[in-house]
Amino acid sequence: MFLTMTITKQTVADQIAAYLHHEITLSGLVDWSENVMMEGEIDGNDTGTIVSVIARLGVADVRAFGLAWEDCEELLGKLGFTPRIEVIAA
């Protein structure tokens, strides 16, 4: 399972991207975050950044926090990534 691998900035960015692409639900993202916080092996080079982003994702299902586009953009920025939007004909 994914929890046996080391969680890197790329791993977290991939999960946020999957959420933004509607490949996983908000509930799925929150569940992933909670599982990683309990059982995941976090990359030692970026532990503080990764843990803070994952912790924020873990409360995204609470009404007071939520997870707007701007939140995803900010979290990805903390990880060293920039989201890009592409609009195509349906």
Image (cartoon, rainbow, N blue to C red):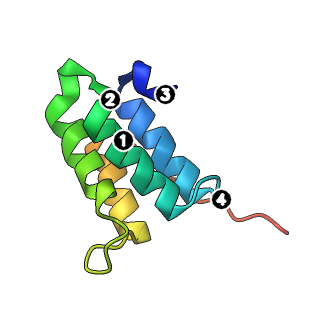
Count how many numbered circles sit on residues in the image.
4
Whole-angstrom CA distance, mark 3 to mark 1, is 10 Å
Q: Which residue is mark 2?
A: 40
Q: Which mark is residue 35?
A: 1
Residue 21: percent from left, percent from top: 62, 56
Count residues near mark 2 (Cα–Cα under 10 Å), then give few for <14, some for 14-19, many for 20+. some
- Residue depicted at x 85% and y 69%: 90
Q: Is residue 30 left or right of residue 55?
A: right
Secondary element at image label 3:
helix
- Residue depicted at x 46% and y 50%: 16
Whole-angstrom CA distance, mark 2 to mark 1, is 7 Å
Q: Which mark is residue 2?
A: 3
Q: Earlier in the sequence, mark 3 or mark 4?
A: 3
Whole-angstrom CA distance, mark 1 to mark 4, is 31 Å
Q: Which mark is residue 86?
A: 4
Residue 51: percent from left, percent from top: 21, 40
